[in-house]
Amino acid sequence: MGKSFDIGLERLTGTGAPETEALEASDQGTQAGVPVPQGSTFYLETFGCQMNDHDSEKVAGVLLARGYRQVDGPEAAKVILYNTCSIREKAAQKVFSRLGELRPAEERNGKSFNTEDTEEEHRGHGEENGALSRSAQARVPVPQEPKHPSQRKIVNAGGGKIIGVLGCVAQQEGEGIFERAPWVSLVCGSASYRKLPQLIAELEAGNRRVTGLDTDTDETFETEITRRDNPWRAYLTIIEGCDKACSYCVVPFTRGPERSRASASILEEVRRLAEAGYSEVQLLGQTVNSYADPSARKMRFSELLAAVAEVRGIRRVRFTTSHPRDFGKDIVEAIEAHPTICDHVHLPVQSGSTAVLRAMARTYSREEYLEKIGLIKAARRPISITTDMIVGFPGETEKDFEETLTLLDEVQYDSVFAFKYSPRPNTPSLKMADAIPEEEKGRRLAILMDRQREIQRVKNERLVGETFEVLVDGKSRRENQWSGHTSSNRVMNFTSPERELLGDYVQVKVVSAMPNSLVGEMIGWA
Ligand code: SAM
Ligand code: SF4
């Protein structure tokens, strides 16, 4: 996000240890009848998508409620947790790199531990490959620190530390993690997070190893005790898992089947969030618009969007990620009818070639996807469109790739997250013929990004002179410099002589533009 804005944004909050923890319920103490050892501390590092970020908020909430205190490095922690991502191979390798740093001294003697990690890929929260901008998944600004604290030191996992692997790598590798890194004692996939307090209690009671690896649950991971990392934007998972079975994707294996949360419970939480001062909510799901209300109300996703938008105090509603198959006119109509719903749809296409889409099992053709884009473009107010793309899928010909490039020209996306295809365990595409060499994938990725960068440059330059409402979420160390996001999720860096703006909505006039961000000056309050 906003990588070209070089004014050194201050860290406001993050996955480390916040100064003040915004714990939603304050039942600090013990749970499950097991007393927490005095002075217990935890360190939690998150990799991957926003759903992982939000899961980590919930995990932190659960631990804080048990009486644990969060610390900002593994050295000082009694419990060290990695919430992991396995969407692409390099994301998964990072975790083993971290685990290697925690190897106890006795384990290091004479033994090698191959992490296969390439640090060039580490950029904090899952920014890999060709993400031109993180604006579609914007988060609280985190400075571009060269190294995470845990990268700087080898921490000895001896001395009674509990090391846990959570999330997609946990689900994918299962108990194999104990073999690869015997100093790990907790392995728990996201579909089993409801069991986390119980698993932690078992470890506290002296158990050496515990696992939570079921995916056949119909429950979602909802907890009363979420510790939220962003003071203005609250994330809310409304649907977990995925039933879509794209041929390249591990998510259906690692996050289990689709299961939605009851609409009344979602709306109740949104009301509580608004009362607590959150003005923006972001509804999350791997396929958020496949939401199927399990309650008797049977609210459609578009109705839920509208109902969330009507909650008093909520000024912005975002939702991600939408699957093209389930994207209908009713969603565009909900956006049109409710200015509170942001002018932005993230609609991953993956490829511009119908042949490749078929091999990917995406369930739509190029033409069908373009029909959905047509619905968005026909809206009464401009809605920005962003997407995900994969290059170098097995069998992708030069002609297929050319069709992806012409799709860029045709749709004129506001931002694109592009990835080199990464073969993943258990997925049908792993066995497909005609693998594309890494070098060729890299070449295609670079071409795609160049083409898209030019599109964004031209589109953003057209915005010079226009005024946007901006939610201010970053402050520079430089005098008078601020940053925030427009409703269309563009990063806006702007000047203002005001002393305090964080969390405010202001009007900003654009004075210049770059491919990934706008530069403006504040002209008033929104
Ligand atoms: N559920 C969302 C959807 O269907 O668009 C996206 C979920 S996934 C966490 C985010 C993106 O990662 C996907 O849209 C896809 O572009 C990319 N991705 C998933 N599996 C991949 C793989 N094996 N290789 C490269 N990119 C992959
Ligand atoms: Fe993965 Fe496809 Fe499900 Fe998205 S829709 S999470 S890409 S299987």
Image (cartoon, rainbow, N blue to C red):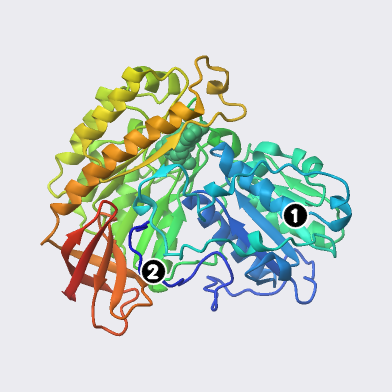
Q: Is residue 136 left or right of residue 408?
A: right
Instruction: Inspect the image, locate mark 1, and give the three-letter code of the amino acid beneath it.
Output: Leu
Side of 138 relative to 492 (left or right): right
From this view, report whether residue 332 is shown above or below residue 485.
above
Q: Is residue 196 visible?
A: yes
Please tell me whether residue 383 is drawn above or below residue 102 in the rendered image. Answer: above
Query: In screen coordinates, is 180 left or right of 413?
Result: right
The residue furthest top is 433
In this orientation, which residue lies closer to the viewer: 126 or 143? 143
Give the label, 1 or 2, closer to the camera: 2
Q: Are marks 1 and 2 in contact (CB under 8 Å)?
A: no
Badge number at residue 199: 1
Can residue 526 be seen here? no
In the image, what residue occupies the spot 65% across and 50% down?
166
Q: Amino acid at mark 2?
A: Trp
Q: Residue 278, position in %: x, y?
A: 38, 69
Work out whether mark 1 precedes mark 2 in sequence or the reverse, and give the earlier one: 1
Q: Which residue is rendered at x = 61% and y = 42% of the image? A: 92
Is the N terminus in the top left, top right, bottom left or bottom right quadrant?
A: bottom left
Give the labeled residue for mark 2. Answer: 232
Residue at (70% x, 63% y) in the render: 153
Q: Helix or strand or loop: what does disc 2 sit on? A: loop
Cα gap from disc 1 to disc 2, whole angstroms: 32 Å
The image quadrant that residue 16 belongs to is: bottom right
Tag 1 secondary structure = helix
Locate residue 126 relative to residue 137 in the image: left or right.
right
Q: Position of residue 416 (x, y in %)?
A: 33, 42
Q: Position of residue 67 (x, y in %)?
A: 70, 73
